[in-house]
Image (cartoon, coloured by chain):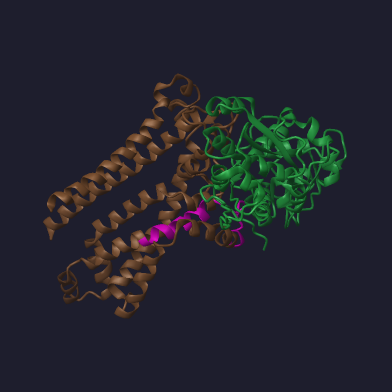
Amino acid sequence: MASIFTLAGGVAILFIFLIFLFTFKEAMPIFTNSIVRETANLEAFFVSAQPGDTLIDRYVWQPTSRNPKMSFWPLILGTLKATFVGLLFACPVGVAAALFTSEFAPPRIREIVKPVIELLAGIPSVVLGFFALIVLATWFQQLFGFTYRLNAWNAGVALGFALLPIIFTICEDGLSAVPRSYRDASLALGSSRLQTAVKVVLPAATPAIFASFVLAFGRAIGETMILLMAGGNAAITSLDLGDPLRTLSATIAAELGEVVFGGAHYSALFFMGTLLFVITFVSNSTGDFVIRKMKRRMQGEG
Amino acid sequence: MDVHQPANPKAVMIILLSVLTLGGCGGERQAAEGGAAAGERARPLTVKGSDTMVILGQRIAEEYMKTNPGTVVQVNGGGSGTGIAALINGTVDLAQSSRAMSDEEKASVRQNRGAAVVETPVALDSLAVFVHASNPVRSLTMDQIKQIYQGRITRWNQIGGPNETIVLYGRENSSGTYDYFREHVLNEEDFAPRVQTLAGTAAVINAVARDRNSIGYGGIAYASEVRPLEIAAEGKAAVAPSEQTVADSTYPLARHLYFYHLEGAPERVTDFVEYTLSAEGQALVAGVGYFPLTQGGATGGASEGVASSETSGANAP
């Protein structure tokens, strides 16, 4: 019986390994093939700049131009901008909602809030993207007077809706798992419920909260559809959150359909996939490492 | 609100699959062809390519399936480049393209599929440049449009509009419309990075309709709730896109829309192409908002591929 479980675990690891191998193999020509290397190489991705005064003119992603320009910076910046806004929105809201549900909500309200927020996770991202494209973008433009209807704020907030359930669920589990005795001790010492929640329960659940942020970050980096629809899709190297953006994953989704197999553009897109893979792998591993360390420290003290 | 396929992302393919019962009601043709050929006819005809031509392909497929019971035609978008790539890779029977295939592409078809490609212009389209209905700008010159899309004109008041930033919308780089626009308006130079690329002309129109300072381009058939601009060629008067101006080539952005298939393709493919070129098919072309091919003139000189024996002169199905 145990061998079946071992096998199942092994298969999962094997799949991940094979997917990575495939993605990397397709990206290999940028290191090995001299024809591909003419336009797609690490220098073109990360170093080369076009002549120009502004960042937007200097770092350009235009792979199908007569004179292909393949700087990854506009796309990396777009990914980070969207992730930043998404986390900025989802982290505080998610943690606060989890704290409310686990510490303050009467049982009947908890029975409603919890499943409803978790239901958000079941909404397909294309629906969120569509909502952001049609409704949210118009509201935001009217409210804040953005020049560009589709921009980083709009895309980021829509992304935040997708991150919210991840953060909420993990935090809520972590908060609920804090031993009853902590609360009792705190209340016995005369703290109010609010003080107990914020100063005792919340710090005790730090590993879970941190884990939720890390997982949400991984999801945000890889999310495609919401950003493809709501981000405005202009690959520009701009730090302004009011500008449209284009992410790494959206670029793969939008352009892989028409590339010549094995060509420079194709390999560049697969290299982008490898890059995404590495980023999520590193962020998840670091997250895991930090969480373990925190847990050990906490158990040592507790 | 007129939303054909709002912001249709590339991954979501527009699939038209009308299921008609594969009735054994043998028409004279099927009876004559015998069992094996009947099986071949029952295979769905797959059409893929230009997002501009999706509504055209779907409309024709609908009517074609009505008049030819037992046939199934699936029409997908994805962009001209995607359709041509699919034809090269052998995953579709017929590619729709809003630009002519390049010589390299034709060569790779021959190399990969072992047959020459047959080019059939099926309709005339005028690429329109759209602005929001409230925009006071009525007409632009080709040069102004070029400068706008290259980011050298950035505000509407530089060209007689309000003091606002111009918001640029365009198409994905897999799109034939994108290629056409770059070739004919930008003279093969690059678009400004600020152009927001959207999947499908419908998405561009939808975006322009919601954004009062925006400008976009796309096939004329999709125009609704936005205003197509009058366009002036070098040293000429500004002209609005219409059947008249497209046919006599005074409108500078008129183009052909093409079907591509392999030479010696099965009958289910050539039948469909013939139907599109028939009077009935051309009426449908006009119905969805494109311009039918004018008899003789426009088709003749347009491209070398037209002379192919496969497709020419077949006006009755």
Q: Residue at x 70, y 47 (%)?
A: B215
Give the colour in which the image draws chain B.
green
Q: Is residue A154 visible?
A: yes
Quadrant where the C terminus of chain B sits is top right
> Above or below — where is B250 with respect to A223?
above
Q: Is residue A148 magenta?
A: yes
Quadrant where the N terminus of chain B sits is bottom right
Image location (x, y in percent) of residue B308: 71, 30
Chain brown in the figure, letter? A
Choose top left, top right, bottom left or bottom right for residue B5: bottom right
Q: Is residue A89 magenta?
A: no
Extreme-right residue of the structure? B237
Q: Residue at x 61, y 35 (%)?
A: B265
Image location (x, y in percent) of residue A255: 52, 39
- In the image, the segment drawn in magenta is A141-165
Q: Viewer-proximal residue, B152 or A11?
A: A11
Choose top left, top right, bottom left or bottom right for residue B251: top right
Q: Residue at x 28, y 72 (%)?
A: A103
Left or right side of B132 for B237 = right
Image location (x, y in percent) of residue B278: 76, 45
